[in-house]
Amino acid sequence: MVCVAWMIVFTGSDLTCRRGERLVFTDLAFDARPGDALMLRGRNGAGKSSLLRLMAGLSEPLAGTICWENENIREDMPAHRARMQYLGHQDAVKPVLTVRDNLRLWASLRDVDNVDAAIDQALDALGILHLANSSGRFLSSGQKRRTALARILLGESELWLLDEPTVGLDRESCADLARLVDDFRAKGGIVVYSTHVDLEIAAPRILNLDEFAIPMFDWLRDEIGEDADAQHPDASTTPASTTRDGTSPSRRKKIHSPSTDFEGIA
Amino acid sequence: MKILIAILARDLRLALRQGADSIMVVAFFIVTTTLFPFGVGPEANILARIASGVIWVSALLAAMLSLERVFQTDFEDGTLELLAISPVPLELVVLGKVLAHWLTTGLPLIIAAPLMAVMLNMNSAGFGTLMLAMLVGTPALSLIGAIGAALILGARRGGVLVSLLVLPLYIPVLIFGAGAVEASLLGLPAGEHLQIMGAILLLTLALAPLAAARALRLAVE
């Protein structure tokens, strides 16, 4: 068991992510062992959600691989989907269905044996058992969020990907969530989450996405914009040469670099 | 199979709770069909002549009317994203949703069709074939429509776009559907038309879930 606990099972290497025409982060790497909680930090737009979506297999990285037990998750998506639970920005709670009916679908998609018992247990864990037969329309945003959180408790899983799980939750529910996360970790689960509120869980490891941002990017965009695209149509392909010469101090301020070396040079 | 039933049960429950959709489709079908006697004139022979074509065209338009909704609400509230990363094949999810769409729109159309046929003075010899042809044809409409409905996700004014995408693909169903009814009205066997429609149905049953699931994956990426 000790051996298993120390084995790194979930890894990502050389990850580059693109959203639309923007490179969000590059050369990102992470690893996680059973029981780990990986907390994603970073400014808005640093790619916390994008990274979680890559981990969930919703989108593909531009470069790099994400592996589970040394096997690329792309090789066997059904297995990855079966071991993973994802909580996105949206709660996916249908207003015309009751909380129980909302959860029933997710339970039946995951081969849960005793669906009703499993739903009761999940709702109880989040303190909303009394809402089981309320229609989704009458839930507050916090109650909807808790319904969405109840969903990730249905069925067996080894990996939780939680995108801003605390949004809309009150202090008490945050404590409930922290307890659930720690319970899950104690059973050997891996949790990756992004949050702006500190979730009080034991010893999370922090992954700061700002470190993997592309520092010259904003500057480069301005440059391309100014230089009339016709003149340097391929400017974007040679960022290294264009950044070296003529970086004026005013521009340098716009550069978002986590390494702070720029400040020293300036 | 269990998964198919779960998806189907949920979509039917949703459709029942917000029942307007299915009633609207049937109402649209009836209203459109009713417009033709006003436009063409109440000449009984002419109406009888165009009846099968009119009913089929109206059914096509009515079926299309509801397509936009097939995946749209799930897409907007994040359900689709979760379905795409659930352990079950997305193709199966598509099939379940198409089946629910057909039960809530195709089936009511089949029931309303003979009423419209009576109104258009169609010879009662064609009623049986009309219903049979619609029974084979409307599931194909739902299946083809699902591809269009999946492709327009995230697009503005998707409703117009889906009609442009889907209506040309509906032409074979229209030709053979109306052809089957015409044939039986003339006392000829309609079997060949129905067989071709069956072939169309099988082809779309095999291909449409694959295509729609691929389009859905692109939409949630």
Image (spheres, coloured by chain):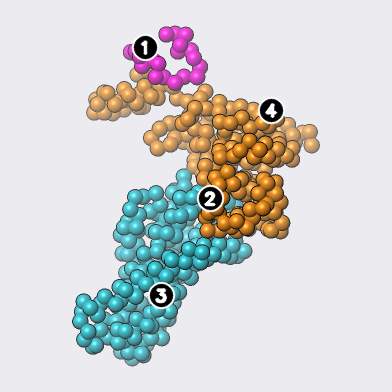
Chain colours: A orange, B cyan
Please tell me if label 4 and label 1 are on a single chain.
yes
- For disc 3, the chain is B
Three-letter code for the amino acid on which mark 3 is drawn? Leu
> Is residue B32 found inside the magenta-colored segment of the image?
no
Q: How far apart are labels 3 and 1 at the CA level?
A: 70 Å
Q: Report the mark closest to the observer, 2 or 3.
A: 2
Please tell me if label 2 and label 3 are on a single chain.
no
Residue B154 percent coordinates (x, y):
39, 49
Q: Is residue B35 visible?
A: yes
The residue to which callout 3 is attached is: B109
Please tell me if label 3 and label 1 are on a single chain.
no
Q: Residue furthest right?
A: A1
- Which label sits on residue A249? 1
In the rendered view, does A50 fall on the left or right side of A36?
left
Residue contact at pointers 4 and 3, CB within 8 angstroms: no
Q: Report the mark closest to the observer, 2 or 1.
A: 2
Count of number-bearing discs: 4
Three-letter code for the amino acid on which mark 2 is drawn? Ala
Residue contact at pointers 2 and 4, CB within 8 angstroms: no
- Which label sits on residue B173? none
Residue at point 66%, 38% (across, down): A172
The quadrant holding residue A141 is: top right
Depicted B5 relative to depicted A208: above or below: below
Residue B155 percent coordinates (x, y):
36, 50
Three-letter code for the amino acid on which mark 4 is drawn? Ala
The residue to which callout 4 is attached is: A203
